[in-house]
Structures are given as C-alpha cells and as structure tokens.
C-alpha cells in the first residue's frame, strides 16, 4: 500500500535520499534502523506529502502523493498516520483535546463517540489520569504516549512511527512495543517503525532494514537480518549483546 | 569589484526574500478570509480565547499610554495655545489628533509589541517543533486553525482598544487643561464635542474623525495579525529561528503601520 520508487531528495548540497525504493504491504511491519541524520524522518515525511521528492515517485494506495490534489492528500493522510519524533502536540490544548483533535476536525462524529474513543485510546496507554493536563506539564515520555494515543484514535490503515520509544523508560518502552504489536496483530495494518532501539526492532518487526547512504539496504526478516555481515548492522547488533546473555 | 557584486547580490537576495514574504503574507490573509465562513463557528472557542488575549491583556497598557499621550499633548500644545490666548481650543486639537492619528497608531504599536510578537513566537515555536507538520498530517489547515482566529480577534479588538485609548487620552487632556491651563471641564468637553460634530463628513452616526480612526484600526489589526502569523509560519531552525521570526514580525509591522497609516490618511483627508 506504500511504495517509493527511486526517490531522490537533496537539501542544498546535502543529498539525503539517493534512490530510495521500497514497498510495504498490509500486515507488514518494517523496522528501519540507521545512524542519526541519515534521512529516516525525511523518508517518512515523503510518505505523507510533507516533503516532495526531487525525482522519483511516492505512491500510497495507488495514488501518487506528489500529484495528489488537496482532497487526495487529505484521503492519504486519513489512511496514513504519523507519530512524530517529538510528539508534536498542540501546546495550548489539554492532552484529551489533543487526542480528540483529529476526530473533532472530521466534524461528522458525535461528541459522545469521540469521548469514548479518546478515553479508550488514552486508557490503553495508561494516560487517562493525565488527560486533563497540558502538554507542557507532563514528562517527555507522557507526551510521546499522548501523541501515540492521537495516532491510534484515528484508526488508520498504516502508521509511521518515528522513534516511538525514544525518551521512554525501558518498561514503558516495552509497553509501547507490545502496543505496536497489538495494533499490528489484526494483520490489516502496515507500519514503518524508525528506531534505534534494537529490542523494539526485534520485538515488532516482520522485516528489518538499514537506512544507509540514502537507500534501504539489507531488508530481511529479523532472523535473516541478524546474520547480516554489513558493518553498520554488526555495530547496531552489538548494542543488543550484553554480558550474560547468549548472543546468536 | 568582487565585493560590490557580492553586496548587490546580497541586497538582491534580501529584496527577493522580502517580496516572497509579502506575497506569502497576502496569501495567508486571503486563505484566512476564505476559511472564515466555513470555520468561524467551529473555532469559536479559539476565537474567544484570542479575543481575550488580544483585548483584555493589553488593555491596561493601552489605557495608561492613552491617558498620558493625552496629557502630554495637552501640555505641549496647550502652552503654545495659551501664549496665543487660545487655551480653550485645546480640546479641538486633542480630539482630532487622537481620534484620527495617534489613537489607532499608538494602539497598533502596543499590540505589535505585546500581541503580535507573541503570535510570531507561538506560531514560530510550533513551526520549528514539527507541530505545524503534525497539523497538516491531521488534515488541519494551519491557516484556519492558527491564523484565522488571531486575525478575527485583532480586527475586532484593535478598534475597541483604540477607542478606549482615545477616550482616556481626552480625559487625560482634560485633566491637564484644568490643572495647568485653567480651562474649565465644561468648556473642554463642549469644544471637544463640537470639534467632532463639525467634521466635514458624517459616516452614518459617526463623525469623520472617529470613523477614519476606526477604519485605520481595523486595517492595522489585519496588518499586525497577518504579518506576525506569517513570520511565525515561516520560522525555521530552532530557537534562533523563532527569535528571528519575532524580530522580523515586529520590524515589518512597524514599517507597514506607518506607511499604510499615511496612505489611509491621504485617502480620507487629501
Ligand atoms: N527541512 C529541511 N531542510 C534542510 N535540511 C533538512 C530538512 N529536513 C532534514 N534535513 C537534513 O536531512 C538530514 C536527515 O534528517 P532526518 O531528520 O531525516 O534524520 P534522521 O535519520 O531522522 O535522524 P535522527 O535519527 O537523528 O532523527 C539531516 O542532515 C538534516 O539536516
Ligand atoms: Mg529523525
């Protein structure tokens, strides 16, 4: 349902995406690893049309994102939700209003139903008791969870997670991992998970790939990816091996 | 030679950027107006919030500045008039100057510094922290969501605040007239009212002086809100970018207020 074909993108001199191509089908969870600043967030922004490729195509459910009109783009953004790296909550709305925002803005849903769905979504992330606080008054991890609740409440067909566990404590990180697994378990959703968290990568990924020099390389199921001899991947995998834990 | 072309190039670049931004601001304004009929009711809560921010919080400053402007005017003009034995016509001068020019301009300046800069900072912070991108991902038009309520609020509040400032200015002038120039309050008020009533034109129930002042205030409200929001939306590059956006917003507002203010006066009084 998401397809990138030979996408190139530069910012000034900096050639960030260099022929990025991949496809993602329903039910797949693609984990993208990569060093900081390689362009992972840039790739995700192309999928929802926040950035336009210099060349190449981005296709979501058969629609070319670059040439979609306003209505087409709205449809794409309804299908594909984006969890921002920083959370990106609206600062002057409470957590509850933030989570309700996408539903309120559709303007066709009765307010009781909105409230139900918002509470359910906040509850699944253990955020109900913070629902009436303002984003400035909760911790970074809570903001992340609130942002995740805002994504889940939209019930999208595909979710782009930009570092969903960064800034969370390890226990909450695992909870978020389980939540992503749960969201994906229906087998009807696609997801791209950008992360540096190797535990999360192996917990949720049906496939893992490395973002390297502007392309996705070594894409493979976790068990195969683990055997890769790519030096950067070996470096990443080493962070997973701890003393006392049998390494593969 | 090289440095000359370099300088020219830089100037050209700055000029193009200014024109770009002006075009952007006009575009924003048009979009905000277009979204108004469809979204105003839906966003009534935000509009009310902004009415409070734009109207109530700057009120004390506007009141104090208005009062003292009237007092300074009365003192400066009054001394000259007293020399000519015309101290009693002080209120004609004060009414005309305040309602036509000083009131709207002063109010817009205060609003630029207090409300406009805050708008640029708020929206700028949202822009650099991906919040605007997030809104777009939720298919929420940032112009309708952020800009429209602010433009509406400032358009409503600038004339009201300006009127309050003018009235207080007249009161301040009256106090100085009484204490420093020994002009009786009754004469002061009578002269003030006749000067406003005897304007060459009436616009409905309003004398020309007050009407042009209100027109000016509305236009100033549009300018300050649009320029500030546009600068905020264009912000990029972290905290430095937000700082730059605020500075751009304030400088551009001041310049536009004085230039457009002149042309409005010109249109009415030439
Ligand atoms: N709007 C932009 N304008 C200019 N340069 C940009 C822009 N967005 C991203 N870049 C540049 O593109 C490169 C990739 O950025 P990106 O945010 O995608 O990195 P990332 O892989 O997500 O890194 P991280 O893991 O730290 O989040 C960076 O060097 C950044 O400076
Ligand atoms: Mg990133």
Image: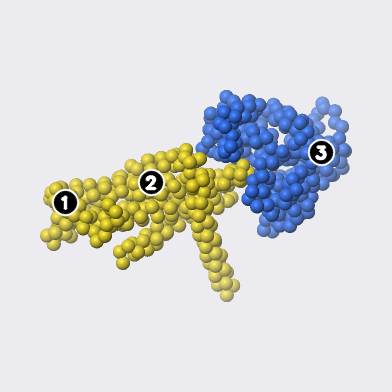
Q: Earlier in the sequence, mark 2 or mark 1?
A: 2
As rendered, which of B167 and B38 lies closer to the eye?
B38
Residue shown at the point (38%, 46%) measured from the top left? B157
Instruction: Give the labeled residue for mark 1.
Output: B190
Under circle 1, the secondary element is: helix
- Is disc 1 surrounded by few (<14), some (14 to 19) or many (20+) residues within 10 Å? few
Under circle 3, the secondary element is: strand
Horizontally, is B168 left or right of A248 in the view? left
Horizontally, is B201 left or right of B59 in the view? left
Chain bearing mark 1:
B
Q: Quadrant of residue A146?
A: top right
Q: Is the Cβ of the residue at disc 2 closer than 8 Å to that at disc 3?
A: no
- Placement of the C terminus of chain B among the 4 image quadrants: bottom left
Which chain's colour is blue? A
A248 up-or-down from B127: above or below? above
- Is disc 2 surrounded by few (<14), some (14 to 19) or many (20+) residues within 10 Å? many
As rendered, which of B249 and A132 lies closer to the eye?
A132
């Amino acid at each position: 349902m998401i397809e990138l074909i030979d996408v190139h993108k530069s910012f000034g001199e900096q050639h960030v995406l260099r022929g990025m191509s991949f496809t993602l089908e329903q039910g797949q969870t693609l984990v993208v690893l990569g060093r900081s600043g390689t362009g992972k967030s840039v790739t995700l922004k192309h999928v929802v049309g926040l950035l336009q490729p210099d060349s190449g195509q981005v296709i979501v459910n058969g629609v070319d994102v670059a040439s979609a009109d306003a209505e087409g783009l709205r449809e794409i953004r309804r299908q594909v939700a984006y969890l921002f790296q920083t959370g990106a909550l609206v600062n002057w709305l409470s957590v509850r209003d933030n989570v309700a925002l996408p539903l309120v803005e559709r303007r066709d849903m009765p307010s009781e139903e909105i409230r139900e769905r918002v509470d359910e979504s906040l509850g699944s992330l253990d955020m109900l008791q913070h629902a009436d606080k303002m984003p400035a008054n909760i911790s970074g991890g809570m903001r992340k969870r609130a942002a995740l609740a805002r994504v889940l409440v939209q019930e999208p067909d595909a979710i782009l997670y930009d570092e969903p566990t960064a800034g969370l404590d390890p226990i909450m990180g695992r909870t978020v991992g389980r939540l992503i697994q749960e969201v994906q378990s229906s087998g009807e959703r696609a997801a791209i998970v950008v992360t540096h968290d190797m535990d999360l990568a192996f917990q949720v990924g049906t496939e893992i790939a490395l973002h390297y020099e502007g392309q996705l390389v070594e894409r493979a199921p976790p068990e195969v990816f683990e055997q890769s001899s790519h030096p950067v991947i070996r470096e990443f995998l080493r962070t997973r091996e701890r003393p006392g834990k049998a390494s593969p | 030679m090289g440095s000359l072309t370099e300088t020219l190039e830089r100037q050209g670049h700055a000029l193009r950027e200014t024109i770009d931004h002006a075009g952007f601001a006009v575009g924003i304004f048009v979009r905000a107006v277009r979204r108004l009929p469809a979204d105003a009711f839906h966003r009534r809560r935000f509009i009310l919030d902004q009415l409070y921010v734009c109207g109530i919080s700057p009120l004390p400053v506007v009141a104090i500045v208005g009062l003292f402007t009237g007092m300074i005017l009365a003192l400066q003009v009054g001394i000259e008039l007293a020399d000519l034995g015309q101290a009693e016509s002080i209120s004609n001068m004060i009414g005309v100057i305040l309602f036509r020019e000083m009131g709207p301009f002063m109010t817009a300046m205060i609003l630029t510094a207090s409300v406009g800069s805050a708008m640029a900072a708020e929206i700028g912070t949202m822009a650099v922290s991906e919040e605007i991108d997030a809104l777009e991902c939720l298919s929420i038009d940032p112009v309708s969501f952020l800009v429209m309520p602010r433009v509406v609020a400032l358009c409503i509040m600038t004339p009201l605040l300006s009127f309050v400032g003018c009235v207080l200015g007249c009161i301040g002038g009256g106090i100085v007239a009484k204490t420093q120039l020994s002009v009786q309050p009754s004469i002061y008020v009578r002269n003030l009212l006749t000067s406003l009533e005897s304007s060459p034109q009436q616009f409905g129930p309003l004398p020309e002086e007050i009407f042009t002042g209100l027109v000016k205030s509305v236009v100033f409200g549009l300018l300050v809100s649009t320029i500030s929001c546009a600068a905020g939306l264009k912000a990029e590059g972290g905290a430095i970018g937000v700082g730059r956006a605020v500075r751009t917003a304030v400088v551009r507002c001041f310049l536009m207020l004085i230039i457009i203010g002149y042309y409005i006066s010109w249109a009415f009084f030439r």
